[in-house]
Every structure is written in structure tokens, then in C-alpha cells.
Image: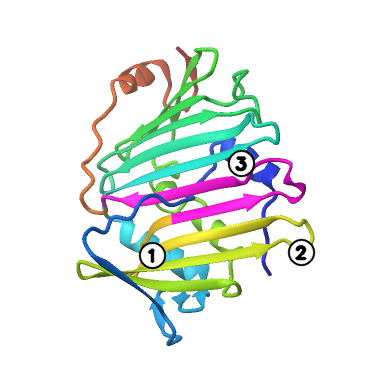
Amino acid sequence: MRRTAGLVLVVAVVLAGCSGVLDGGSSETTGPSTANETTSGERLAPGLTDAGVVNASALVAAHESVLGNQSFTRTTNATARTANGSVLVDTSSVVRVGPPGEGLDSVVEQRGSATSVATGGVPAHREVWTDGGPVFVNNTYANGTTRYERLPADASGRSGAVSGGVEYALEAYGPANTSVNERRSNGSTRYVVTSDTNGTTTGAESSLRLVVDERGVIHELRTETSPAGNTSSPLVRTAAFSGVGTTEVPERPAWVGTAMNRTAPNGTTASG
């Protein structure tokens, strides 16, 4: 069964810091390319046929398997406005991930009025760093307050960067209303999946654009959800995975030393 998340719920999740990996940036391919619609019904990648995503779990598992032991960079964005044009949500993040145990660095910027970003309920700026040990977090709020956290080792940092909310995003889009096109460039093959769905009960509409290679690595993912009644602009969420195997190991940011001194091993937090 298809399902389309309501805009208000999704915005709340984004601002709570659980936006996951949704979706797409620019293509990594360079040089001349060709695009041909696939028509043979063959399996193109794990969980993907020319009909579309037939098994989201298999596709995400393949994506995780490839990225699980390699470095990579993930870039995400989420944007939406209210009917009068004010910013409802505007969130961006860049996560640089080294091989397991060799460093993860994340920077998230959040703006908007859907929750209490402006009043300090949600961090306006959030940085996360770990080298395989404790996860240190630097939260800065709109009023200038800084709060540090120390979380248990591998507190879903790497696994969250690899997968996040990708599977949840894909579950809403089956083979119906889907097209798959093959794109070749410089000897590599990628598949561009586009799909849309209408909410039968909510009246909401959503669309998907996915770029995946033969291994199942998701290079780009973009979803757009429009609420029923046009009460706000569509919520657009994008994610891009790049630098697979070539992203340099992130160095420890200067603020981590302060976080180490101001937090205890039991995970207590302290204000800066």
C-alpha cells in the first residue's frame, strides 16, 4: 500500500533533526552522455527493475553494503514555505564520513518557524564529530546559547549517514506512475527513476527522482510533497552521495576539546 506523509508531520521530523538522507544534488558524471528508456523488464540493480523500485529494502541494503566500509560525503536539504511566503523549514547538512573508525563530521543548519527554532527549542546550528569512540555534539541556538553533548560510541552516526530515511522515502513509490531511464557516461551506467503518487484520502501529491547505479548505490534522491489545499509550498527534500572512496578523513574540529572537558562519560550535557 502506498502512503504519503503529511507535510506538517514531515516538517516536524526535519526540524527535530531526523531528516535522514533525502535527496538529490548534481550528477557526478562528466563528458558526453546518452539516455535510453529501459524496456526489457530486466533487473537493473538490487530492488530495481525497469518498472521502478520493486523492493526498497533490497535497494537500501545494497546501498548500505557498498558505503558501509568506504568514505563518502552526504549533502542534504529540505525546504518549504507557508502560504504567505514565510519560511516554514530550511534545513541543510553536509556529512563527511571516513572509513569505519576514522572520523565522521556533520554540520547541520536549521531555520524556520514550524517548531521553535527561533526561540531556542531546536538548534539553529548543529555539529557532530566522532572517530569511532564517543560522539560529541555542539548545539548552537538562535539566542546564541551553545550546548555540548557526549553520546555513546557509534550512536547511529555512521549508519544514519549511510541510510537515514532513504528506505522510508522509497516505500511510498511503487512501479505505478514510474519511468526508468538508463544514462551512460564515461563507461559507467546509472538509472534515473521518476515517480509520482496522489494521496487517495489526504489529497496530497508527491514525486520522486532517484539516480542509482548498478550496484545499488543511491547517488541522488529528491522528493517533493505538496499538501492538500495548497496551504503551503511543497516540501522538497534532497540528498546526494558523492566522493565514495575518495572523501578525506575528517579532522577533529577545535570545539571537540571543549566538549570533552565540559561533558562527562555518562552523557551529561553542558552549556557553553
Badge 3 local density, few (<14 within 10 Å), some, or many (20+)?
Answer: some
- Left or right relative to 29: residue 5: right
Q: Amino acid at mark 3?
A: Val
Q: Residue at x 69, y 63 (%)?
A: 198
| Sequence-earlier tag: 3 or 1 | 3
| Image location of residue 232, percent across then percent down | 69, 40
> Which residue, given by chain and number where applicable, does mark 1 sit on?
212
User: Does residue 159 sit above or below 171 in this rendering?
Assistant: above
Q: Amino acid at mark 2?
A: Thr
| Sequence-earlier tag: 3 or 2 | 3
Corner quadrant of residue 126 = top left
- Left or right relative to 34: residue 238: right
Task: Tell me the element at label 1.
Answer: strand
Q: Residue at x 39, y 77 (%)?
A: 44
| Image location of residue 123, percent across then percent down | 53, 25
Badge 2 local density, few (<14 within 10 Å), some, or many (20+)?
Answer: few
Corner quadrant of residue 10 = top right
Question: Which segment did they paint magenta?
Answer: 221-243
Q: Residue at x 28, y 55 (%)?
A: 28
User: Does residue 156 sit above or below 15 in this rendering?
Assistant: below
> Which residue, given by chain and number where applicable, does mark 3 sit on?
13
> Which residue, given by chain and number where applicable, does mark 2 sit on?
200
Residue 225: in magenta span = yes
| Sequence-earlier tag: 2 or 1 | 2
Q: Determine the CA span between mark 3 and mark 2.
A: 23 Å
